Image (spheres, helix red, strand yellow):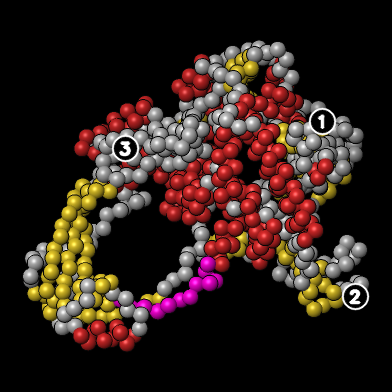
Amino acid sequence: MADKLVIVESPTKSRTIEQYLGSDFKVKSSKGHIRDLAIAGPGGLGVDIKNNFKPDYRILAEKKDTVKELNNAVKKAKEIYLASDPDREGEAISWHLADTLDIGDRPVYRVMFNEITKQAVLEALENPGKINMQLVLSQETRRILDRIIGFKLSKLLQSKIKARSAGRVQSAVLKLIVDKEAEIDKFVIEEYYEIYAKFADFEAKLVKIDGKTAKISTLEKAESILHSLSNQFTVKSVETKLKSTSSKPPFTTSTLAQEASTKLGFTSSKTMSVAEKLYQGVSINNENVGLITYLRTDSTRLSHNFIHSAFECIAKHYGKDYLGHPKHPKSKNKLQDAHEAIRPTNCDLTPEKVKPYLQPDEYRLYRLIYARAIASLMKSAQSEQTTIELENENTLFRATGSKPIFDGYLAAYGKFDDETDKNLLPNLEQGKKLDVVSIEKKQLFTTPPSRYNEARLIKEMEDLGIGRPSTYATTIQILKMRHYVSIKDKRFVPTDQGKATIEKLDHYFHEFISSNYSKQMEDTLDEIAQGEKERLGVLTEFYDYFNPLVDNAYKEMKKTKPVEVGELCPECNSPLVIRHSRYGDFVACSRYPECKYIKPDPNRKPKKEVQDTGVTCPQCHEGTLVKRIAGKGKKKGKPFFGCSRFPKCKHISPYKPLDQTCPKCNAPLVEDKDGSVFCLDQEKCGYKQDK
């Protein structure tokens, strides 16, 4: 029997870590948070505002079995080690575990590791600490504040304009997208021209007229300049200088999401999902190995041990001439520098070595992370930059070129980021006369600001301090799910509902959806985590200012009437209107809920009816278990039994469905992992087959 119980967040991580520990350790998974604020009390907030914002925590319905399993493990252990992720959210998960489980007087330790390797795990367990309650209070403050803002604004918008939700972070990001669209709508396109002189082996652009920057706004002016030029140019100057391009620092959460979007075409949620697998561990030669360090970080710092091993790899694979110097970034505060940058856990595990053990997307992301970390410790790339200026009458033309001298960090990262310009120019001397091959004008038009793609939006969120690394991907996903934005050419376009939502929020709650407020709140949460501010004071000040604004909005904000489609309901003769749902727009009767007519959509595929077993859901005792198929289309998976009340009840039967029925009650038969076969309806029937 194991004397020591280690509780981590994910099952994959638990399997990896258990390999590193002896028989006196047992590793279990909480599968993330086990508790959250209840959806109860005034406004469904789960917070007693009048009692110092006391939270009402409840065990999540889908985690009751997990808590039961953990309690059974706790009873068999003498010591408890809480090893949730090393961040504010992870600290809160550890505290909820300690506060919920039947630990009694058993000693409880908090352990953290930045990477899931044997050395890191053993060192963490040898140097355990305590739960940091300041971090817990900081996370609790965020959760309460966001619950109040989210629930109150969402309820308001649902009643007034049928918008689905609002929130401190998601609304601030949506405002960025809506404001950018407004800039684009206001933009006035203007015509302009550029003039190029083509010579035998290079091309030069007109840059100055009479010593002033060339601005050619009409065809007439362009034609006039062309007619004024002779066919012979004089070399005014030739300037050559050495250009040094430094490597970029290793990845943070934000820069990884940006680079994976630009270079690999990954969405932010996909990047985080794949990175999580690399962090938790992949099976290599029958051993689970964590390949990268913790993926939620603001820091670009690298450990001395990694720098030493990376220098050895660089010298071995590229030569000592490529060895650079470690970058020493200045961190904004200690919290943001709590973890290293995202890097490989072992330099010897090159992408080529581990490729046979990785899925294609895992390999591509690991190769990007590995190359960036190694390149960050290599010398700068150097090139010879040449600028040639040529005169013709009262005009000045310019040509630029580059000749690579030393590839430096690009030897490792060039496949992702080739910064060198390989446009070579001929050797020319000052005063030399050159005959032109042709002089041509090019018609161009000013372009409006570009919409945000995922990479640019995440960079903007980071620059403005909206949210934290762990929230970037989730926030973007929510905006898509709420149909506040659509994707066009891989860029975000606000929907009419998204624009209407921001219009109302901006009018009544401008301060709370601004990027400035979100940044100030993140800074305040950091101050709580560092013990510089009190949770109660922050929440009281916020609520006393925010709640009167909500009351005023209920009085002043007008309801938006549904748009009529010009048809009458065939059942009650009332007008049909456009309504919205999580699945998109549909046409229904304006008298809902009195009349529940919905106009059939000829373009929508009919839903496949699920097989209802009639067996009462053992979790909620309200729905029944129905047979569903996991996944869709090509990703269609195996059948399973789940509650008919999904998503209100997320119960999924852990047993494998069989194509047989119970001889006693005709309910489906299922199979457990140990091969035993029994009736799905164990509460009423209880039939089991003899092995």
Nearest to the observer: residue 399 or residue 306: 399
Closer to the chain start, of discs 1 and 3, is 3
Q: Is residue 191 magenta?
A: yes
Element at badge 1? loop
Q: Is residue 320 left or right of residue 288?
A: left
Closer to the chain start, of discs 2 and 3, is 3
Dot 2 amino acid type:
Asn
**Crowdedness of circle 1 by 10 Å Cα count: few (<14), some, many (20+)?**
few
Q: Are marks 2 and 1 in contact (CB under 8 Å)?
A: no
Residue 346 pos. (x, y %): 40, 31
Does residue 203 appear in the picture of this structure?
no
Residue at image location 34% in from the left, 36% down from the top: 327
Q: What's the mark number on residue 573? A: 2
Disc 3: which residue = 377
Nearest to the observer: residue 348 or residue 408: 408
* Vertical placement of residue 586 versus 74, above or below: below
Stretch in magenta: 183-194
Element at badge 2? loop
